Image (cartoon, rainbow, N blue to C red):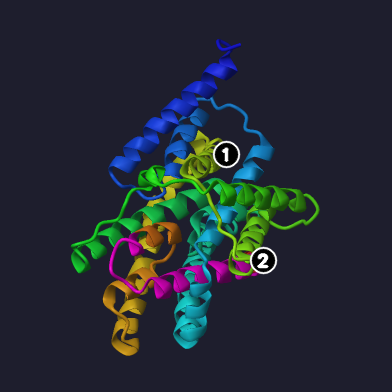
Amino acid sequence: MLHSPRVVRWLVLIVLSLVAVSLLELIHLPAALLLGPMFIAILFAVTKQMVSLNRTLFRAAQAVVGAMIARAMPIEVFKEMQHTWPIFIMTVFSVIAVSTLLGAVLAKCKVLPGTTALWGSSPGGATAMTLMAGNFGADVRLVAFMQYLRVLLVTLLATVVSHYLAPESAATSAITQLEQPVAWGAFFITLAIILFALILAKFIKLPAAPLLLSMIISNLAMNVGGLQIELPLPLLATAYAMIGWSIGARFTKDILRYAFHALPAILFSVILLMAICCGFAWMLVEYAGIDPLSAYLATSPGGADSVAIIASSVSVNQPFVMSMQTGRFIAVLCLGPALSRLIARWLH
């Protein structure tokens, strides 16, 4: 059994994924827990060595990510949204409008097919956007390519900015979470919520239903029921690996050639979006009295989880930063499907 080709491929996939994650963590690359397995799965896929992935486990991984997103939305975030609602609305929807326009231009110029450019340009959570995109006719592989390229560039710039504006602080690696004790009671309650969301997702037909239902139920349990959402690093790492493998397994040599052919246009759109968001940050500093680092992190387009890690390790207005990031994520979740249909009609 242990020597069967399928088992051997699984073992090699897991070991190489662990090595890739470790290397990415050493250089503090954002989203290493997902990108490492995804890179290895792409290598397996283009060499036709990829193993088949269980759909139920993939849906469970989505539900875990949903709980993780909910954990980043404590009640203080929603209070901050209410407190700064004029700035909140202006900033959140300005970033969404600019990213949608850039995505529409890429689609109209046929840099990327269909609504792929729109989902790839969406400044919400990269993992959630990638998971939802496939339900609306977008190419998940190219969406992932765009999203994680932007996450990489945005987070690297955020790290540099944080270093110069708050040099006494440093962002911590996700691996340090292994040192934190697990609250077992809260952990089992969190697992029960995830399981309930998975069961409910079978009866409620929503795009990326396990992720969205788990996010909503977990957030209600945390902010209304006062429960703690406990997600140990091994569970999160497994969920991210499943999602990374699922995305990477869909790549082919042709799609890689297509992605690299479109790279100059994609890079230009990402850098332009980042520059415009820096302009929004400058306006927050000049006209709203927000400190420069908080303003920059609040307007960074995407990579909310990576921004949260940086924000937690430097002296910034964390509720303000996370209210902007979370609010934009929620807005994109709500508006994404409608915008996707609108752009699809415009393209035709």
Is 285 covered by the magenta stretch?
A: no
In the rendered image, the residue lying farthest to the right is: 203
Question: Where does the C terminus fall, quadrant-wise?
Answer: bottom right
Q: Residue at x 31, y 52 (%)?
A: 172
**Image location (x, y in percent) of residue 129:** 55, 57
- Span colored in magenta: 310-339
Instruction: Say whether residue 346 is visible.
Output: no
| Residue on which the image places disc 1 | 246
**Camera-side residue of 213 and 180:** 180
Magenta span: helix, strand or loop, mainly?
helix
Q: CA distance from mark 1 to mark 2?
A: 25 Å
Q: Quick one: SS at disc 2?
A: helix
**Viewer-nearest of labels 1 and 2?**
1
**Camera-side residue of 36 and 143:** 36
Is 322 covered by the magenta stretch?
A: yes
Give left or right: position of 277 versus 198.
Answer: left
Disc 2: CA contacts within 10 A as few (<14), some (14-19) or many (>=20): some
Mark linked to residue 15: none
Q: Residue at x 64, y 44 (%)?
A: 60
**Image location (x, y in percent) of residue 170:** 25, 57
Q: Is residue 163 above or below residue 252?
A: below
Q: Is residue 303 above or below residue 76?
A: above
Question: Where does the N terminus fall, quadrant-wise?
Answer: top right
Q: Quick one: SS at disc 1?
A: helix
| Residue on which the image places disc 2 | 341
